[in-house]
Amino acid sequence: MSVSIVPLEALDRADVLEVIGEAFGRPRSPDWYRWKHEEGPWGRSIGLGALEGGRLLGLRLLLPWGLRIDGVPVRCYRAVEAATRPEAQGRGLFSDLNRELMTMVEAAGPTVLFSTPNENSRRAYRRLGWTWLGPISHRYALVAPLPSRGVIRAEARKAPPFTGTHGTVATGWDESSWRWRTDPRCGHEYTTSWIESSDGTNGLTYRTAMAHRLPCALVLAAWGRPDLVGRAASSAALHLRGPLVLEAAGEGASKPVCQRGSTRGGSLLAVWTSHDEDLGAARRLDCWQTNFADLESVL
């Protein structure tokens, strides 16, 4: 049978969730889908599916993303949910769906696409003309888990202020998009610690992770004066009863909480741009300012 490519809107929601669950080995709920692909702060996701004999074999979704270059919003999508049923793998569906979507977004004007794929996707992305950046390092650091006066710990409602300047590529988070990003439907619960006297202008958002059987504060984002952010990190470590902090660091990452640590692994970044003359900064890793709010695998 021949494979036909159809828009996301023409696909049955139950089939979409089934294919995603099969591809990633984890069932996904309709509530999760609504959070991620319908209630996003920058718009609903777009995508394509591959049908054969009425059966959905694979799909690819693009999630609208609030990227800014030089502080100016640009049209951007994050490539997510590249899902193919096990029996249909190796038939080129990943490349076919991506090519079709790239043609669609290119026709609409200057666009950035980015993804944080696994190592197995490297060749496929390169064949499609994407630029392979990274890795952006994951770094573990030790902090003293100490009580700190004047530190408030609460739900992750305070958004990190946007600090992107000339020559930078960064996500323009605001209160609305941050509430969406830290919604528990993503599968994690986040906490924010901030200095009360600074009215939230110094702090960090984190969640519990495990590293070598020890609780670890995975830092989604941090902002403000290094000494005050350090106090908030110590409070977070005390809350989690562990001295470890995990954050993105080095080239391509925002300014880290800790200046020293041990690197273990990293996040790969693949980027494609239409109208290259307008969006060249997106293809340079040294221009990106990412953190786990951008890189975490939930997205």
Image (spheres, helix red, strand yellow):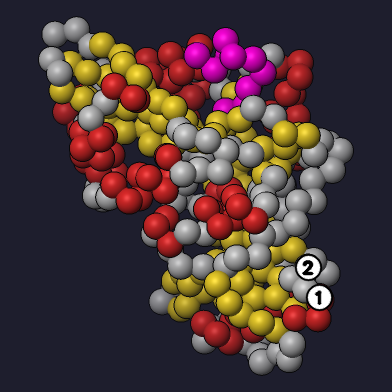
- Most extreme residue toward the right is 166
Q: CA distance from mark 2 to mark 1?
A: 5 Å
Question: Residue 220 in magenta?
Answer: no
Q: State the residue at coordinates (63%, 39%).
A: 66
Are there few (<14), some (14-19), or many (20+) residues within 10 Å of tag 1?
A: few
Under mark 2, the amino acid is Thr
Q: Which x, y percent locates residue 171?
A: 67, 44
In this view, 90 is above or below 264: above
Three-letter residue code for mark 1 = Ser
Tell me: residue 142, above or below residue 119: below
- Judging depth in this view, the residue of 26 and 120 nearest the camera is 26
Q: Is residue 137 above or below residue 258?
A: above
In this rendering, is residue 185 above or below 228?
above
Residue drawn where x is 42% and y is 39% of the image: 37
Q: Quadrant of the N terminus?
A: top left
Q: Position of residue 38 (x, y in %)?
A: 43, 40
Query: Which residue is at the front of the view, 234 or 36?
Result: 36
Could you tell me which secondary element the residue under label 1 belongs to?
helix
Which label number is shown at residue 201?
A: 2
The reply, left or right, for residue 24 in relation to residue 287 is left
Quadrant of the rendered image containing residue 99? top left
What residue is shown with label 1?
198
Position of residue 267 in the picture relative to residue 21 (left or right): right
Q: Position of residue 93 (x, y in %)?
A: 31, 19
The residue lying at 72 percent from left, 34 percent from top is: 73
Q: Which residues are magenta?
A: 104-113
Disc tally is 2
Numbered circle sitting on residue 226 = none
Give x and y (percent) for residue 284. Answer: 72, 32
Circles 2 and 1, Cβ within 8 Å, touching? The answer is yes
